[in-house]
Image (cartoon, rainbow, N blue to C red):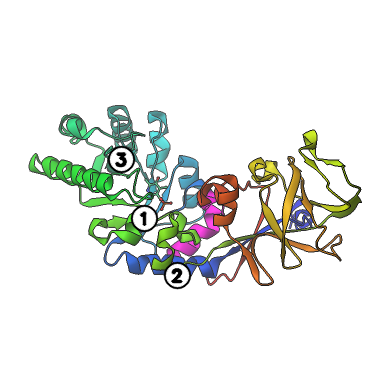
């Protein structure tokens, strides 16, 4: 072990990743998928959980395929021995086609330039490469307009280096439970695919389902489901929590570095945004917005010390956060702090933190930077 790895093990702030909880979540979602394939979405460093160990565990738990958003993430998985099909679920530049083919990654095709570049790269490397057509049914991020999908296929379906293995779309309003819009978009997708098929353009694998559709709409599972955030223990919407017994995979802990007693009327932190009302004990926790612990948590967020909730006050700087431990009589340096997870009878969930940040669970976990050490526990493999 290099000395740097050894010394980083002394840093008090650690994200613990429970691989057994993750494994259980994958299996539960696979049950929900019934007979459809399960593509485990592990984009953005597996929503902050660490893409390589999470992907290995996903495969061990029965995931049929993996989904990422950058070519680098896909290549990293290949270099770590992952053999399952890997999809790139975002739009990429045509010049990345050579790497796509070399690392055997399945791109989402939404432009003629990319289709041609992938075909050329495949022909040059002596391969026929699998690709999926992306249809835009209303997210308006990327994808082919349904009205022009026929022309698009006429222009590139027969390119010699391509195997059109699948067609898919992604819904913008499902998490909000807007079923009217989502059903319209689902029909648009199904009608488009049927029309293409009538014209000789076939795509064996059809897929539209993120976590919400996987949980709530078996009628839209089609050939494959693509859950992401739910693999990590959180349903996209609160209304879905009772539908499945997911377990949070990440917890985040640190320790009190120093506790100081400040007199009344003392400004605390940059800009003095917080002023003590009485004698207050203010403590430092070694995490900051440079680690992805967001500044919007100031004066709103809570942490657990001695089994009780305490408030973040004054400021979150790049590397340090201040908390008010006045009500924890014996709080002292070295005490364990839970930022995310359980302590005593209380628990702070990523949903709580998302509420304080006015954001979603995805941002809470995926924002944590590589600087925070991940420790993997309960690995089965
Ligand atoms: C991120 C993503 C998913 C997973 O979405 P969740 O809501 O996290 O389950 C599925 N499909 C595509 C195309 C995505 O980009």
Return the x and y of residue 235 as percentages of the image width and height.
44, 58
Q: CA distance from mark 1 to mark 3?
A: 40 Å
Q: Secondary structure at mark 1?
A: helix
At x 84% / y 55%, what residue is drawn?
257
At x 69% / y 72%, what residue is drawn?
344
- Single out the mark in the foreground, 1 or 3: 1
Q: Secondary structure at mark 3?
A: loop
| Residue behind mark 3 | 126
- Single out the mark in the foreground, 2 or 3: 2
Does the Cβ of the disc 1 residue fall within 8 Å of ligand 1? yes
Decide which of tag 1 and tag 3 comes sooner along the chain: 3
Return the x and y of residue 347 as percentages of the image width and height.
62, 65
Does residue 306 belong to the magenta stretch?
no
Q: Is residue 257 left or right of residue 305?
A: right
Which labelled disc corresponds to residue 212? 1
Q: CA distance from mark 2 to mark 1?
A: 15 Å
| Residue behind mark 2 | 245
Does residue 47 belong to the magenta stretch?
yes
Badge 2, how many Cα within 10 Å: few under 14, some, many 20+? some
Quadrant of residue 155 within the rendered picture: top left
């Amino acid at each position: 072990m290099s000395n740097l790895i050894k010394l980083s093990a002394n840093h008090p702030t650690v994200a613990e990743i429970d691989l057994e909880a993750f494994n259980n979540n994958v299996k539960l979602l696979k049950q929900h998928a019934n007979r459809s394939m399960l593509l485990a979405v592990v984009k953005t460093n597996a929503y902050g959980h660490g893409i390589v160990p999470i992907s290995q565990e996903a495969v061990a738990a029965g995931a049929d395929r993996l989904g990422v958003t950058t070519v680098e993430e896909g290549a990293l998985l290949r270099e770590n021995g992952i053999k399952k099909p890997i999809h790139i679920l975002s739009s990429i530049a045509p010049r990345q086609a050579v790497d796509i083919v070399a690392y055997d990654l399945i791109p989402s095709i939404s432009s003629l330039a990319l289709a041609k570049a992938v075909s050329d790269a495949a022909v040059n490397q002596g391969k026929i490469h699998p690709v999926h057509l992306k249809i835009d049914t209303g997210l308006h991020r990327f994808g082919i307009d349904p009205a022009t999908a026929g022309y698009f296929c006429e222009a590139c379906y027969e390119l010699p280096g391509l195997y059109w293995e699948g067609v898919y779309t992604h819904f913008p309003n499902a998490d909000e439970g807007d079923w009217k819009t989502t059903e319209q978009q689902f029909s648009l997708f199904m009608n488009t695919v049927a029309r293409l098929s009538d014209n000789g353009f076939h795509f064996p694998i059809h897929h539209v389902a993120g976590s919400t559709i996987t949980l709530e709409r078996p009628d839209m599972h089609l050939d494959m489901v693509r859950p992401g955030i739910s693999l990590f223990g959180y349903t996209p919407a609160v209304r879905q929590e009772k539908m499945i017994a997911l377990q949070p995979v990440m917890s985040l802990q640190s320790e009190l570095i120093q506790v100081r007693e400040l007199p009344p009327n003392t400004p605390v932190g940059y800009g003095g945004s917080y002023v003590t009302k009485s004698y207050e004990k203010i403590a430092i926790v070694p995490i900051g917005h440079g680690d992805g612990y967001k500044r919007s948590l100031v004066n709103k967020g809570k942490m657990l010390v001695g089994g009780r909730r305490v408030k973040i006050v004054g400021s979150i700087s790049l590397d340090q956060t201040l908390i008010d431990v006045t009500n924890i009589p014996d709080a002292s340096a070295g005490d364990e702090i839970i930022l995310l997870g359980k302590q005593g009878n209380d628990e702070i969930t990523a949903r709580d933190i998302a509420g304080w940040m006015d954001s979603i669970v995805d941002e809470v976990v995926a924002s944590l930077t590589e600087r925070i050490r991940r420790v993997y526990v309960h690995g089965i493999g």
